[in-house]
Amino acid sequence: MSIVQLEDKLIELINKRDDKENFIFELLEIFDFPKATITRLKKGNQNLSKDENEIHLKGKLWFKQATSGAAFEGFASLENKVEELNHKPRYLLVTDFENLLAKDLKTQDTLDIEFKALPLHFDFFLAWMGIEKVDFEKENPADLKAVERFARLYDAILKENPDLKNHEGLNKFLIRILFCLFAEDTGVFPKNSFTNFLKAFTKEDGSDLNVRFKELFNSLDSVEREKLPTHLKNFDYVGGQLFKDIHTDLVFSSKIRKLIIECGELLNWYKINPDILGSMIQGVTNESNRSKLGMHYTSVPNILKVIKPLFLEELYEYFGKNYNNMEKLSELYERIGKIKFFDPACGSGNFLIITYKELRKLEIKILIRQRELSPYLMYIPSVTLDQFYGIEIDDFAHDVAKLSLWIAEHQMNMELEELFNDKVRAILPLQSSGNIVYGNALKLNWIEVCPRMSDEEVYLFGNPPYLGFAKQNNIQKNEMKELFENEAEYKNIIDFISCWFYLGSKYIENSNAKCAFVSTNSICQGEQVSVLWPILLKRTEIIFAYSSFKWSNNAKNNAGVTVIIIGLASNQKKVQNKYLYIGEHRKNVSNITPYLTDGENIIIYKSNKSLFGLPAISYGSKPTDGGALIFTREEYETVIEKYSELEQYFKKYVGADELLNSTYRYCLWLDEASYNKIQNHPFIKDRVRICSEFRLKSKKNATRKLASTPYMFAENRYKSKNAIVIPEVSSENRYYIPIGLTDSNTVLSNRVYEIYIDDLYVMGILMSKMHMVWTKAVGGKLETRYMYSAGLCYNTFPFPKISLKTKEEIKNAVLEILDIREESGGTLAELYHNETMPSDLLAAHVKLDEKIERLYRNNPFNSDEERLEHLLNIYQKLLG
């Protein structure tokens, strides 16, 4: 049950004051107590109290229904009774239905409220649902409630106005409502004035809401206040463009009116973080994106992963070092008021808002210390919204970003005023709220948006859109082409986010500016590295990086994906301290490679043959047949039952799915000689016709030519030999690549790689952790799965020359693994999944790893990062 549902159920409950006997049972039902337990309590079977006005459920609750005006006395009597118990209930609860008192005997928290206020304190009893209040408060409950209530409001409005989904007018209305709700809880408007205006001056059926909103919004944009009706004079002139546009007429209902009023009465907007406003408004329009109780709604921890190493940690270090130096503190105070911050894909402003608030927090800390050193110091504002720049292509998100920045400013000003009793600056009319430009970041000149001098301190950051080639529309593909057309091999730069890294590198070139972006890890894997990074490294160097982790929040363009964070600076400035973040650990390194490892800037390029003497590898055979030459086992058996004479023309057929699931299909396998023998067979004629027609329909000239030999695979790489088989795609939930063996009568598909060799030592090399580490780093990704590549993963894999004796040792280790596989009896998919891998199979692989790794060095590797660094160094030495 969501927060809003809990509140609504409790509102219904407190309105049933006449049904006092069932109050406690309905309360327990709301908090998910089993119906059987509630039934037994009603019958008295589980009630440990002999008092008819009490319910004592062991370990959970002791409730007392007090007479009017006697709630406190009733509570005192329960406290005395519970003192005598060895096993105490979690809660004491007493009410006379005017007041309610409760105590959590585990945490010693107490509740003393009016009975009607119970819905606002639902979280006090969440332990009944297995959620401790302290944990729930970490989830920013005010944000959770705001999102859920706003989602409900949006749905109700859309139901009455279905043609206005994603309409600019409806979006404007939502932003204005948010502003008014926030304003009445933070002193911009008189307390509760907006909610009371709706309650007092609109009809319950909502029929006049549209007119009233139009009047209110017009008045908020009017400098002239004297001629306004009395009920509108409570509201000051707002200005700032927010209410300038004409209100779009909407149809309202009693439900919409009720929901808006509840947003005002049941939420404290002062506690709501402005960085979630954009996510809230954008998220409510998509039912699947709405989170329920217990879900995170803040992106603050992840945003801090970007801005802390980029600039915030250094500022705080300077503050700490000069804590007692008034002159240095003043320099820092002045410095933070000059830095520029720029998000060129700002969405609804999350990064800018968090950065602004963090900088204001530092400003306050400096000011507090300055006043300790000099008590009569006057406050002169340092950090302003004028320092914040952004670009956003969505006009609605652009508007939300500006509003959210203003709210963040107001919240921080209120915090400062509470600390020092100083009026910071006038609240209204709305002032400039950041330099947020509406436009396409790939078309605009970033230096014109956020001007900078070469020695000026500027930080670019953000979470630009991640779009692989297949998800890009034609406009986006053309934008990439225009950006990279003067760079070699730009067509192989497949991820849209590369554009932001490219433009960021140009912006910070030969300057003090730095940038850091959240990115999919695709730009540091596979062929993209050899194309993108030589371009970036001409101008920049990596100054910090986070290896892959899950980015999960409600920011724009986020889908809980696996990401990395990369920070860049001009390579002319030579930053001394560079940091690699791996999990919770930070490593100080001399240089960070494009593969996010410590070492020289080594880039792996595709090779057509093994650089380290391994046998040849190739794709399997490709049918390009429209299904004419491939058969399931059932289809094959049906054919052979009818045409037994054709059995000799079929072979087993194995692709990646068949390999991993320990099964196979069949393929019709003909060459020119065998086809000439049976070309007039009715079944053969039919399958050849299907294949020929399919190839003739192709847009590719080469495929149409293949229609002249429709009885053969389009690409034939089959050899009548045993083969080592590697799937092209493998799950990320595996410690090792699941590699198989096939016999000489099996044709392999183009979804696997094949190595025709009987010597099993090669299989041992490919099944090793060293090879897995190399594949993860230099191979590409399909979503989060590993993409194996002959040119990048196999042919470049650094492997030392070994003796015949060592080959025999590796072969024996492989045979042990194969024996365990056979004894276990599962499929490769089951045997090699992290959660289902048999312990003896894992142990056998560890033994193999030890043999393989001793070939590289005598002392064991401590981490995969060490393994990769070692492999990259070998590769570098080979290429000089």
Image: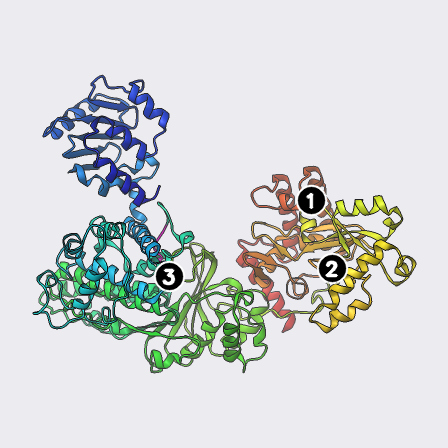
Tell me the distance, in whole angstroms, between the alpha carbons under discs 3 and 1: 63 Å
Q: Position of residue 173 (x, y in %)?
A: 28, 63
Between 657 and 641, which is closer to the camera in this rendering?
Answer: 641
Please give the name of the residue rendered at 69% of the width and 55% of the height, measured from the top-left corner. 726
Decide: few, some or many residues near mark 3? Use Cα within 10 Å; few <14, some 14-19, many ≥20. few
Q: How is the image coloured?
A: rainbow
Q: Which residue is mark 2?
A: 620
Between 851 and 110, which is closer to the camera in this rendering?
Answer: 110
Q: Position of residue 715 (x, y in %)?
A: 76, 64
Q: Secondary structure at mark 2?
A: loop
Describe residue 635's horizontal placement relative to residue 328 as left or right: right
Label pair 2/1, CB-CB below 8 angstroms: no
Amino acid type at image mark 2: Gly
Specify the quadrant that holds the N terminus: top left
Q: Position of residue 161 (x, y in %)?
A: 33, 58
Residue segment shown in magenta: 296-300
Q: Which residue is mark 1?
A: 817
